[in-house]
Image (cartoon, rainbow, N blue to C red):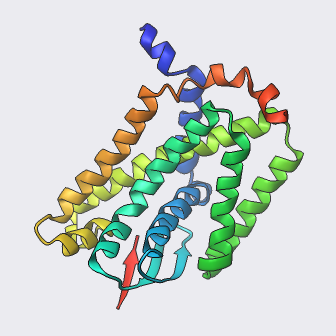
Amino acid sequence: MGFLKEKFSIKFFLFIGVAFLLVNIPIIGNYISIINTVIHESGHAFVALFGGQVESISLFMNSDGVTYGRESIWIIDFFTSIAGYVVSSLMAFLSFWLIQKKQYTFLIDILLGYILLNLIFWVRNPYGVFWLVSFGFIFLTLLIKGSKTLINNLLLLIASVLLVESIGSAYDILIISMMHPQSAGDATNLSELTVILPAQAWGIFFFAQSLWFCFLGYKQGLFAVERQDRHFVEDVGGDKGEYH
């Protein structure tokens, strides 16, 4: 059991449990889950910019999102469709990695960067704007007025939500691709782009990559967060396409 103590901590499981409960609370859970939706849709947008044009991103009250962009060359459409779930999983991994490295300010800058980029350039629907403004305000208020311990726990909670949601949303698309392959969002888009690979195969891919990033975090010891906390005080001070 020693290797489990080296790779995990009670605090990690506590925060994962809290994150799981929060995202499943009606209304509040959808509001919190949108942080993962913002990163997912931004992943589509970032890749689409390499060869196309992003027209807008919409964020919805049920935590769904959609990116609207002009049709581009096949290779850009292909990687744009893949990017949402992969960037979401990567961001969950990166958040825990930055917390381990005590790069708290950098993680804060990345999260605020996502919010500002979407607010300035892409999100135009009313609820999406409301979410970005309200979440950004709450986040900034806690950062400015909160204690170092509160900030540390806030970042860890956000990282936990991203991990839970990156795996959970990938699992959802896997199930949808199996039961309703014509309505499986990015998996359906990819099946149409690749022709020979069905939506089910892409659903499996999306879920597998989310588990791979989680396993990579385990291998890197990113989930042993209690030992990282000991140094926190010292270090912080000092046509059109739609991608779902």
Q: Nearer the viewer, residue 111 or 207?
A: 111
Q: Quadrant of residue 199?
A: bottom left
Q: Nearer the viewer, residue 236 or 240?
A: 236
Q: Is residue 5 above or below residue 208?
A: above
Residue found farthest to the top: 2
Q: Nearer the viewer, residue 242 or 228?
A: 228
Kindly identify the residue that appears in the image at 61 percent across and 39 percent down.
Answer: 98
Is residue 182 at all visible to an observer of this figure?
Answer: yes
Instruction: Indicate left or right for 150 with 218 as reference.
Output: right
Kindly identify the residue that appears in the image at 37 percent across and 82 percent down.
Answer: 241
Residue found farthest to the right: 145
Q: How many marks?
A: 0
The spot of residue 206 in percent (x, y) is: 31, 53
Kindly identify the residue that appears in the image at 39 percent across and 79 percent down.
Answer: 242
Instruction: Indicate left or right for 196 with 63 as reference.
Output: left
The spot of residue 133 in percent (x, y) is: 73, 68
The spot of residue 219 in percent (x, y) is: 41, 27
Residue found farthest to the left: 196
Kindly identify the residue that appears in the image at 58 percent across and 46 percent down.
Answer: 22
Look at the image and tell me in which quarter the N terminus lies. top left
Is residue 165 at all visible to an observer of this figure?
Answer: no
Q: Nearer the viewer, residue 24 or 184?
A: 184
Look at the image and tell me in which quarter the C terminus lies. bottom left
Q: Is residue 60 above or below residue 96?
A: below
